[in-house]
Every structure is written in C-alpha cells, then in structure tokens.
Amino acid sequence: MKSYLIAPSILSADLARLGEDVENVLKAGADVIHFDVMDNHYVPNLTFGPAVCKALRDYGITAPIDVHLMVKPVDRLIPDFAKAGADYITFHPEASEHIDRSLQLIRNSGCKAGLVFNPATSLSYLDYVMDKIDVILLMSVNPGFGGQSFIPATMQKLQEARRRIDESGFDIRLEVDGGVKINNIAEIAAAGADMFVAGSAIFDQPDYRKVINEMRQELTK
Ligand code: DX5
Ligand code: ZN
C-alpha cells in the first residue's frame, strides 16, 4: 500500500503551549510536524526560527520536522535549522539566488531537500534538479497565512508534478500545503500527492485523533 504522510502545520497550533500541542497531535496519529518559517519579507507574516525548532527537540519531540522556509535570503538559515533538528528543509526557488547551491547545502547538512512552488510558479524549476531533491511541495494557497481556501488549479499541477516524479525514477515525495481538509484530501491524493500539510483543519478541531483518522479513512478510498 502507498504510504501517506499527514503533517500538521504548527502555524495553527496553540503557540502558548506549543510542546504539549505538538505532542498531542503526534499521539493523535500525525506522521510529521510541518514548521512554517516566515520572515515578513518574502511573505507578509512573521513566525518561528531555529530556536523554536530546537526547543521542540529539547522538549522531547522525536518525529520528523518538515521546515518550510518562506524566507529570503535562504542559505543562511539552512545550517541553523539542520543543527536545530530539522529533517526536511524546503524553500521557494524564487527566494534563492542559487537554487542548486541551496539544495546541495541542505543535503550536505544531512537533511532532505525540497523546492516549494507557489500557485503561479512554474514547475520548470525542476528541470535540472530532480536528482537533488527528496520532496516537491506544491502550495495550494498563497503562502503567508493558515486558514485559506484550496486553489482548484493545484489539482492539475499535482498531476504534472506526479508525472515528472514517476518519469524521473527518483524517490521523491509530493507534498501539498494549504486548504487541505477531510472533504478534499481524497481528491488531492488521487491527483498524486502523498504528503499532506494541514493546519487549521486539524488544530481548529477539539479532537485531533478524529480528524486524522477521518483523513486516513478518506485516503483508503
Ligand atoms: C501557509 C503555510 C501553511 C499553512 C496551512 O503559508 O505554508 O503550512 O499553515 O494552513 P491551512 O492548512 O490552514 O491552510
Ligand atoms: Zn507550510
């Protein structure tokens, strides 16, 4: 069976008790913690840096941490997040002066590397780097905020990204981020995604386990 990963975004977590909330969502069945890094420059919002990632590790969180960099410049933060305990580090190609170098820096730091595509960013950035990436992240909203609606054109883009992955023969995850809910996750998976970020859909509900179970149920359809 295909392995699907559910990655709650801590952007929607209870930030005043982050460690406990992350622990609870993992106990409820989450696979990966999605960690949104915003700099009030590349995107119009400001969130967490490497110190918060390290704090989660020190608190005892051992699950994979998926660091989504929405920052410009990119490279300076890569070694810091690797040291702070990141497993995946992804960045937006428009925000990097040297995409190949940033990807190499991530892998050389011992992390899985990925490119993130905004809704209107072309997948052509993938053309010469398929051998250097472990994950492709398609944004299904414009980056910066949780709680936005899934942009339908993402479905076709997911199919194109899936085709590129399958043709490449490399082992690459296809992640989707923004507006993922119980009622659209099956369709998103059918379009080719195998890693699902969900912020508000999980953290805005009182029973995380119920939401995650229902998402998994949708994924078996
Ligand atoms: C948006 C972030 C997302 C966000 C998703 O820039 O990258 O990870 O938290 O939130 P929801 O699932 O609420 O759309
Ligand atoms: Zn994200």
Image (spheres, rainbow, N blue to C red):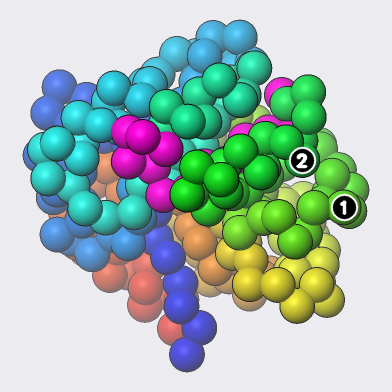
**From this viewpoint, is residue 176 visible?**
no
In this rendering, position of residue 171 left or right of residue 87: right
Name the image quarter holding residue 80.
top left
In this figure, which residue is indicated by the disc labeled 1?
128
Q: Residue at x 89, y 48 (%)?
A: 124
Mark 1: amino acid: Tyr
Q: Nearer the viewer, residue 206 or 14?
A: 14
Are the residues tagged 2 and 1 within 8 Å (C-beta)? yes
Name the image quarter holding residue 120.
top right
Residue 212 location (% of width, % of height): 30, 63
In magenta, the rendered stretch is 82-95
Reply above or below: 192 against 27: below
Q: Is residue 26 magenta?
A: no
Q: Residue at x 66, y 43 (%)?
A: 104
In this rendering, position of residue 150 left or right of residue 78: right
Q: Residues within 10 Å of mark 2 (few under 14, many from 20)?
A: some
